[in-house]
Image: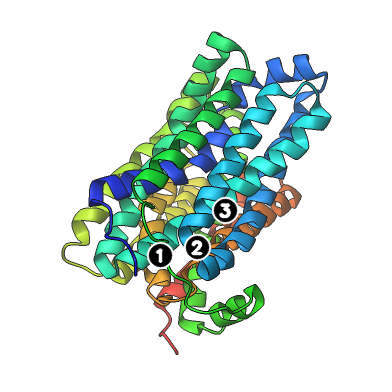
Amino acid sequence: MSHPPAPRLGFTLLLAMTVALGPLALDTYLPAFPAMGSDLGVDSHALSLTISVYVFVLSLGQLIGGPLSDRIGRAPVMLAGLAIFGLASLAIWHSDSFRQLLPLRALQAFGGGWAVVCVPALVRDRIHGREAAKLFSMIGLIMVAAPAFAPSIGSLLLKLGGWRSIFLFLGLYGLALLLVLKTTLFRGPRAIPPASQLSALRRYAAVLSTRPALRFILLQAMAFSVMMLFITHSSFIYQGHFAVGPSVFALLFGANIVVMTAMNLTNRVLLNRYSAHQILRLAVTLQALGIVALLLVLWLAPKLWLFVPAMMLTVGAMGAISPNNQASCMEYFAENGGTAAALMGALQFSVAGTISALSALLPETVTAIVAAMAACSAVCLLLVWTPMRD
C-alpha cells in the first residue's frame, strides 16, 4: 500500500530540485576551470573531459536505475542515488589530483542518474494526462532556470572559498535533498511496490514493444538535438559569423532562455483547454517554422536583427515540446515507468551528443548548421503528425 501523495507544491518543488542536479553539476564549476587547471596541473582540454564523462555516466546511471526503480521501488533508488551523488561530491572536495577527480566525477554522475531517472516515473505514478503535463512543465521551468543561474552560483562560491567549495555545495545539496525526501515524500512504506520481478532486459523489451510510445522517445532525442546543435555552435554563429562581443553574445544566448520560459508558462495555460499531444504538435510546428525563417534570413537578408528572433522561436519552442512530449510518452507506462524514463533520458543525451559531435564534420557555415537543425526538425514533424498505430 502506497503512502498518501505529498502536497502538490512541495511534491513539484522536490522533484524540480532533484532534476536540477544535472545542470548544477554540469554548470556550477565551469567558471572554476582556470583555477582547477592551475591547482591540479592540467589544461582546460583535460578538464573538459570531466563534462563528457559526466554526461556519459549520467546516461548509464539512468539505464540501470530506471528498471531497478520499477523492481524495488522509487524511494530506495532515488535516495541511494542522492547518497552516491552527495558523497562523491564531498570526495571531490577533498581530491588533490586529476586522477582522483575523474573517477569521482563518474561516480557523482552515476548517482545523479539514479536520482534523476525516478522523477518522470514518480510523476506517472501519481498523476496523468493534462495534470502530468502541467507538472512536467513546472519541473521544466527549473531545468531552464538552473543552467542560467548555475555559473553565477559557481562564480560566487569560487570567490568565497575556491573551486573546492563548489563541490562542497553540491555534496551538501545532494545530502540535504536526500534528508528532506526521506522525511517527507518517502516517509513510511515504500513509495511504489514492485509490480513484478522482471529482469531489466525484459523491462526494456516491454518498453520497446510499446510502439506508440517509441515515437515520443525518438521525438525527445531529435528535438533536443535541434537545441544542442545551436548550443554547440552558438559561439561561432554569433561571435564568429555575426561578430558580436562576449557581452552581446551572453544577452543573445539568454534571450533563448527567456522565450523558453515564456513558452513553458504559456503551455500551462493552454493545458486547461487542450491536450498535451495537441500542444506538442503546435510546438513542434513552431520550431520548424522558426528554422524555415532562419534559412530564409540566411538566404535573403542575413541580418542579425532578423536572425535572432527566428532562433529564439526555434530554441524557445523546447519550453513547450519537452513537458508535453514527456507526459504523452509516460501515459503508456503504468508499469515500467522508470525503465521508460531511463530509455528516454539516455537516448536524448546519446543521440543529441552524437549528432552534435558529427556536426563538426559539416562545412563551417551557419547555413550548414541550420540545415542540420532542419533535418532533425523534419524528423520531429514526421513523428508528431503521422497517424498513430498500436
Q: Kindly indicate the quadrant of the structure image that contains residue 133.
A: bottom left
Q: Are marks 2 and 1 in contact (CB under 8 Å)?
A: yes
Q: Is residue 209 above or below residue 178?
A: below
Q: Earlier in the sequence, mark 2 or mark 1?
A: 2
Decide: few, some or many residues near mark 1? Use Cα within 10 Å; few <14, some 14-19, many ≥20.
many
Q: Is residue 265 above or below residue 3?
A: above
Q: Nearer the viewer, residue 207 or 349?
A: 207
Q: Residue 357 in the image: x percent, y percent?
A: 71, 50
Q: Kindly indicate the quadrant of the structure image that contains residue 324.
A: bottom left
Which residue does the numbered mark 3 point to in the structure image?
114
Q: Nearer the viewer, residue 132 or 127?
A: 127
Amino acid at the residue labelled 3: Trp
Residue furthest top in the image = 160
Amino acid at the residue labelled 2: Gln
State the residue at coordinates (30%, 55%): 135
Q: Earlier in the sequence, mark 1 or mark 3?
A: 3
Which residue does the numbered mark 1 point to in the structure image?
325
Q: Residue 206 in the image: x percent, y percent?
A: 56, 82
State the residue at coordinates (46%, 47%): 297
Q: Nearer the viewer, residue 125 or 341?
A: 125
Q: CA distance from mark 2 to mark 1?
A: 7 Å
Q: Residue 61 in the image: x percent, y percent?
A: 64, 55
Q: Secondary structure at mark 2?
A: helix
